Amino acid sequence: MELAHLVGCVAFPILKTLAKFFCSGSIATVNASAKALASCTSTSHFDLSADKIQQVITDFVKKNSPDKSFYIRPFIYTSDLGIAPRLHNVEKDFFVYGLELGDYLSPDGVSCRISSWYRQEDRSLPLRGKISGAYITSSLAKTEAVESGFDESILMNSQGKVSEASGMNIFVVRRGKLITPGFDQDVLEGITRDSIITLAKDLGIEVVERPVDKSELFIADEVFLSGTAARITPISRIENYKYSTHRPVTDQLREALTTITENRDRRYQDWVFTIPLD
């Protein structure tokens, strides 16, 4: 039985001496997801401090001493044996794994289809946390997309509004405004999503969080996906509609985010956790 939490950090080794990645946001997501699972029971909490998580990740990076970009995934999971689905009276544990990861999706743009599968509702799962059980729908949607000739899927919610991709948040650009579904649309509270919204506001780009209709995707100027592994990935086509390769807002935000993750923008140094590698 696994009632586990999923979240990732991406590390970017620079000259084989430094690993840089968004860490505090991922640690906060670990804790929030664990709390979401623990909230249903008064007898089975899992206390793991942010400092402890950060230390484990730091030790993991130092021991592996990577020389390529790689993805780190911390897990909180139930380690008890048993067949009953439950969260009470079970042992819980924590581990970290990682793997080398280049471009998760093509930086030149991806093709998407509207999935026949729907995003779950928050009343059925704590969707603001990264809970592994929620990813069965993502898996179905991703496979459906790939096997029908697309790179990615876009899921609607139960109200027929745009929610997110299989494992990424979605942004729409119209008339210079950056639009993204709000939390009331059953989306994940993505770390990269939050970073993009902050960056856009700092760059003077108006940000609107609201419901997005499917038809709005086909009249947008730009559409892109965001996530820890995907970073900012432009969408080149949805179904049969193709977008222009001129993406001024997407490109501006992607360049700004890349500059920060490579620790070249001192204004956002508190977003980056640096680990010296021997």
Image (cartoon, rainbow, N blue to C red):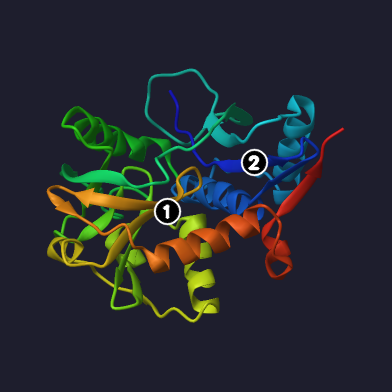
Q: Quadrant of the N terminus?
A: top left
Figure quadrant of residue 211: bottom left
Q: Position of residue 36 (x, y in %)?
A: 47, 50
Q: Residue at x 60, y 29 (%)?
A: 98
Q: Position of residue 10 (x, y in %)?
A: 59, 42
The residue that label 2 is drawn on is 11
Q: Disc 1 marks which amino acid?
A: Ser
Relative height, residue 123 to residue 135 (above, below): below
Mark 1 and mark 2 lie on one chain; the one further toward the N terminus is 2
Q: Disc 2 marks which amino acid?
A: Ala
Q: Residue at x 30, y 60 (%)?
A: 223
Figure quadrant of residue 101: top right
Query: What is the spatial separation of the Cα atoms under label 1 and label 2, in whole angstroms?
Result: 16 Å
Q: Residue at x 59, y 49 (%)?
A: 26
Q: Position of residue 43 (x, y in %)?
A: 54, 42
Relative height, residue 170 to residue 83 (above, below): below
- Mark 1 lies on a secondary structure that is strand
Work out whether residue 252 or residue 31 is closer to the camera in this orientation and state it: 252
The residue that label 1 is drawn on is 226
Binning the other alpha carbons within 10 Å of mark 1 as few (below 14), some (14 to 19) or many (20 upward) gives: many
